[in-house]
Image (cartoon, helix red, strand yellow):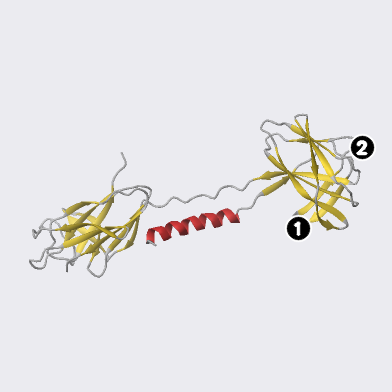
Amino acid sequence: MSKRTIIILVAVLFVCMLGAQAKTKYKALTFNNSGTKRVLKTDAGNYYYYRSLPEKSILLDTTGITKLELRSFSTEVLRKPEIVVIIAKKRQTYSLQQAQIINKYNVYAPVTLEIPKGTKSIEVLCYTRSMYMRAFNIIPPKAPKIVKLKNMVLKAHGGAVSLLHNGNSSDYYSLLPSQALKFSLNNKRNAVVYVRPRLLDRSVPKLGVYQNGKLVQTIEFTLKRTSKYSVQGITNLGISKKIDLPINNGSSDYELKALSDHLFIAKPVLIKLK
């Protein structure tokens, strides 16, 4: 498994963990014309539950609501507990399943209702006088924010240096046979790298360019030296070469390795978006 694949899997796992941590929220709703009330104390909170007036349905304002949960309990054991929901004059009967007993109340499993878009109100009807109900708006968890990666991330080098020219300086990074220059490009951004070798003898400087661990290009430098550019502590700088890095289709790891016994200085530069 490649390093890039491992990084992608870790990122996906992180997003999944964030999604698992995000909890669905519930907001208690109030019926418009309910009757008497009783409080039900649970780990999820203490709420008043209501029963309808005799032979009457209770109304619930559902403006802007797309999904709600109807919770209920009864003060006595019922042979066939059920509630009727009326949406746009269409009746739907829901049989209730007992989930637990709390303080001698028979608490039923919630009924989840999908509310058609534009529905301003619904009716809830229960003929059993021992039944108490409360509706809760289901507020889905917000999607976790995905942090955008930096376009370029420097990962390893042999040390930072300043390249001097006509009184101006530019930041470069050194690389040696024992220490490669490593960086990543993200967000489909591409870059070029300006590289100079240090010339100590007549051997030809060679540099390897790697993308995601694979050698994609070998660069050879001339033995010409420059007198216009200098770095404090590094003598005999060679002529610079501009290296066009392989296309980055998403996120890629790049590495510049010295394939000869030379020191190089390099500067990766992002290509401006058109």
Query: Above or below — where is 9 with respect to 84?
Result: below
Relative to 273, 166 lies left or right: left
Q: Which residue is mark 1?
A: 43
Where residue 76 appears, x then y in whole percent? 91, 51
**Front-lying residue, 15 or 2:** 2
10 Å neighbourhood of mark 2: few (<14), some, or many (≥20)? few
Q: Amino acid at mark 2?
A: Pro
**Mark nearer the N terminus (2 vs 1):** 1
Mark in front: 2 vs 1? 2
Considering depth in this image, is 253 or 150 the residue closer to the camera? 253
Image point (91%, 43%), residue name: 129
**Residue 116 at x, y = what percent?**
68, 34
Give the SS element for disc 1. Answer: loop
Reading the image, the residue beneath label 2 is 54
Residue nearest the viewer, comparing 271 with 113? 113
**Amino acid carrying mark 1 in the image:** Asp
Name the residue rendered at 68%, 30% in the picture.
118
